[in-house]
Image (cartoon, rainbow, N blue to C red):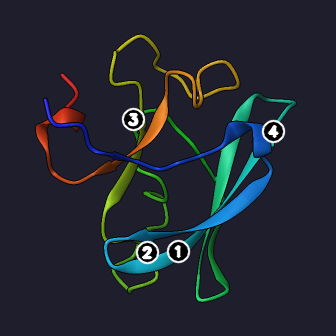
């Protein structure tokens, strides 16, 4: 099995942000954690301008899917929170960066969920 690329999130540093090259573009990802409701969000920026604020990480759903537009401001690849072992099916404090990671869908079979 070919493993896809993984977004290198350092959960212990959240809230934090970093720049990452995705599909030929440089983007900034800022991660936050909601302690009251036990979920994570990510803000996407490009060129110093926020594109999407506090998009929730939802298991199995591509990041920014609710706001994605083909306007060059979004990565031209999907980033999907998944547990490739199949043990977890939710993104929360217990699973994120332990079993559930952010995978870049590059079209390989590894992200196909059955």
Decide: few, some or many residues near mark 2? Use Cα within 10 Å; few <14, some 14-19, many ≥20: many
Q: Which residue is mark 4?
A: 34
Left or right side of 75 for 101: right
> Badge 3 is on which residue?
60
Question: How busy is the neighbourhood of tag 3: few (under 14 within 10 Å), some, or many (20 plus)?
Answer: some
Query: Which tag, 3 or 2, sits closer to the chain's start?
Result: 3
First-in-chain label (4 vs 3): 4
Name which quarter of the figure residue 37 lies in: top right
Of labels 1 and 4, earlier in sequence is: 1
Residue under the point 78% across and 45% down? 13
Counting from the top left corner in percent of width and height, residue 15 is at 80, 50
**Marks 4/2: CA distance?**
24 Å
Residue at x 48% of width, y 79% of height? 26
Taking the spot 70% from the left edge, 34% from the top edge, the residue there is 39
Task: State the separation of the CA atoms marked 4 and 3.
Answer: 19 Å
Q: Position of residue 102 (x, y in %)?
A: 46, 42
From mark 3 to mark 2, how far is it between C-alphas? Answer: 19 Å
In the image, residue 33 above or below residue 114: below
Q: Residue furthest top?
A: 87
> Dividing the picture into quarters, in which one does residue 68 lie?
bottom left
Q: Residue under circle 2?
A: 74
Which residue, given by chain and number where applicable, does mark 1 sit on? Answer: 27
Q: Secondary structure at mark 2?
A: loop
């Amino acid at each position: 099995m070919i493993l896809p690329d993984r977004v290198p999130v350092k959960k212990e540093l959240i809230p934090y942000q970093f720049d990452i090259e995705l599909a030929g573009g440089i983007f900034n990802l800022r991660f936050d954690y909601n302690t009251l409701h036990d979920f994570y969000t990510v803000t996407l920026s490009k060129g110093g301008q926020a594109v999407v604020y506090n998009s929730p990480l939802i298991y199995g759903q591509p990041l920014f899917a609710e706001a994605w537009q083909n306007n060059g401001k979004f990565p031209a690849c999907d980033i999907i929170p998944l547990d490739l072992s199949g043990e977890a099916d939710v993104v929360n404090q217990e699973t994120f960066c332990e079993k559930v990671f952010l995978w870049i869908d590059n079209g390989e079979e590894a992200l196909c969920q059955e």
